[in-house]
């Protein structure tokens, strides 16, 4: 039933689908607007991405993600995590550098030390411009 509604309404039209129990999900606001996996430990390579035109290495643990299509405003949710060789795990949190075209991140291990690792995963949820 929900899939039929999306097909009949067309892409770009606000649509909700049924979720668990009585919840529903808005297909425009409920999806990630950018995401990626970046290796800044060995070769500064974007391993996978969606709506990301580039990543810039700022300093140890700090990097800046540039979007292909801008966000609608600077009040979006920026998410992230990291994992690396030798059982290095931790958080990859957004800094106070949210902008419509970029977002700064900082990768820290479980002791709070900034790290360059081979798997920085990041995503953003909000509205595109």
Image (cartoon, grey):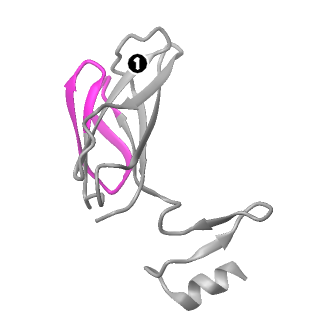
Whether 91 is drawn above or below 129: the answer is above
Majority secondary structure in the magenta region = strand
Tell me the SS state at disc 1: strand
Q: Can you give x and y, in whole percent of width and height, for residue 61 in the image?
A: 31, 21
Q: Residue at x 30, y 28 (%)?
A: 40
Is residue 7 something one can see in this rendering?
A: yes
Q: Tell me residue 1's x, y (percent).
A: 73, 83
Q: Position of residue 17 (x, y in %)?
A: 65, 72
Return the residue nearer the eye: 36 or 97: 97
Can residue 43 be seen here? The reply is no
**Residue 4 sits above or below residue 14 on the image:** below
- Residue occupying image coordinates x 31% and y 31%: 95
- Quarter location, residue 115: top left
Q: Position of residue 15 (x, y in %)?
A: 55, 77
Asked whether residue 73 is drawn in magenta, I would say: no
Q: Quadrant of residue 73?
A: bottom left
- The residue labelled by disc 1 is 108
* Picture residue at 38% right of the left edge, 61% below the top: 127
Residue found farthest to the bottom: 8
Q: Quadrant of the C terminus?
A: bottom left
The residue depicted at 40 percent of the width and 30 percent of the height is 93
Residue 52 belongs to the span the image colors magenta = yes
Within 10 Å of disc 1 (Cα), the crowding (few <14, some 14-19, many 20+) is: many
Q: Which residues are magenta?
A: 39-64
The one nearer the camera, 98 or 83, is: 98
Q: In screen coordinates, is 75 left or right of 31?
A: left
Which is nearer the eye, 17 or 23? 23
**Image position of 92 with respect to 128: above or below:** above
Judge by depth and name the residue closer to the eye, 32 or 75: 75
């Amino acid at each position: 039933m929900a899939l039929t509604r999306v097909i009949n309404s067309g892409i770009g039209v606000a649509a909700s689908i049924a979720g668990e129990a009585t919840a529903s999900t808005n297909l425009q606001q409920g999806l990630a607007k950018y995401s990626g996996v970046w290796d800044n430990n060995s070769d500064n390579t974007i391993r996978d991405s969606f709506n990301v035109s580039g990543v810039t290495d700022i300093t140890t643990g700090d990097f800046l993600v540039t979007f292909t299509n801008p966000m609608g405003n600077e009040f979006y949710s920026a998410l992230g995590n990291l994992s690396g060789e030798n059982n290095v795990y931790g958080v990859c949190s957004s800094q106070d550098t949210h902008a419509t075209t970029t977002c700064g991140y900082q990768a820290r291990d479980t002791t709070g030390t900034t790290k360059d690792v081979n798997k920085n995963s990041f995503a953003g949820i909000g509205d595109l411009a």
